[in-house]
Image (cartoon, helix red, strand yellow):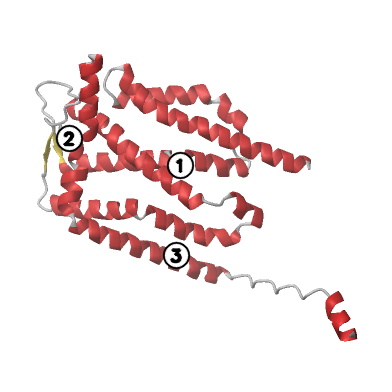
Amino acid sequence: MSEFNTTKNNPPNPPPKEREMSFWEHLEELRWHLVRSIVAVVILAIVAFIFKDFIFDKVILAPIRQDFYTTRLLCEFADIVNIQALCLDNSKLEIINIRMSGQFLTHMYISVMAGVILGFPYILHEIWSFIKPALKQNEKKYSGGTVFVCSVLFLTGVLFSYFLIVPLTINFLGTYQVSEAVANNVSLGSYISTVVSVSLSVGIVFELPVFVFFFTKLGILTPAYLKKNRKYTLVILLIISAIITPPDIFSQVMVVIPLWGLYELSILISSRVYKKQQSELAG
């Protein structure tokens, strides 16, 4: 009976502390995360390489065709509102290859970039798996779903860019002339780099709410700062949209509204994080 009481009154032994990993063990752990990420990209790149016809004819070169989804919708809308500038015509753009190995190297490059874009959620998962053990318990709680949110925002940005900003950019740059004596014969490499860079850059811009969340947590950003610079941000977005879109208000608004919505969402996120931090400090 006494043995039972002793066991009952004594608290259980605390679990042993996890052994802190050395610097070289952290490097080894990081190496395997990178290896798994690279393997995933390579596998997806091989798949993209095999499906060359689909990748190039149905995806990469689709924005210059008159039957492209966005082009058809804009032309139909242009007829309704009687603004013909909205009806893009990228079909006159001639893309040429000027290097012997140009098309093969482009095929390789696009396959790798397709692997990176398609494998982005898994790459984020590997990065997050490496960072997560270093976070405190409350930080883990507040950052739950980070991989999912980042993946959705990035892929949404890429799709938004591909279906809207890319056709508008191609239309502007492909038809712009300093003189009628200079024809636009665009090299394959130049066209590919434009499509890829615009799509990836907008995908990264769509991560703005996530960056604002973490920068606010770190005390680098405040909602007051974001609100103070709201008008400057709007001016910058209007300038960017005016450069890449046809000379009409509707096209500029189509580009500005989603980007401006992201900025406003970032302010709301920053305000929520900031208020929570202040209440914790006050408590």
Residue 206 visible, this orientation: yes
- Which quadrant holds residue 108? bottom left
Return the disc, 2 or 1, that comes first in the chain's sequence: 2
Query: Is 255 on the left-hand or right-hand side of 207?
Result: left
Query: Is 146 on the left-hand or right-hand side of 277?
Result: left
Which residue, given by chain and number where applicable, does mark 2 sit on?
Answer: 64
The answer to which of 49 and 175 lies nearer the viewer is: 49
**Residue shown at the point (30%, 27%) measured from the top left:** 244
Q: Amino acid at mark 2?
A: Ile
Give the distance between the C-alpha atoms of the residues marked 2 and 1, in whole angstroms. 28 Å
Q: Is residue 203 above or below residue 238?
A: below
**Residue shown at the point (50%, 39%) measured from the top left:** 209
Give the distance between the C-alpha atoms of the residues marked 3 and 2, in whole angstroms. 39 Å
Q: Quadrant of the C terminus?
A: top right
Which residue, given by chain and number where applicable, does mark 3 sit on?
Answer: 33
Name the outermost residue toward the top.
82
Give the distance between the C-alpha atoms of the residues marked 3 and 1, in whole angstroms. 22 Å
Name the outermost residue toward the right.
2
Q: Amino acid at mark 1?
A: Glu
Return the disc, 3 or 2, that comes first in the chain's sequence: 3
**Is there a contact, CB below 8 Å, between mark 3 and mark 2?**
no
The spot of residue 264 in percent (x, y) is: 51, 30
The spot of residue 105 in percent (x, y) is: 18, 53
Res 207 label:
1
Return the disc, 3 or 1, that comes first in the chain's sequence: 3
Label 2: few (<14), some (14–19) or many (≥20) C-alpha neighbours in 10 Å: many
Q: Is residue 8 above or below residue 168?
A: below
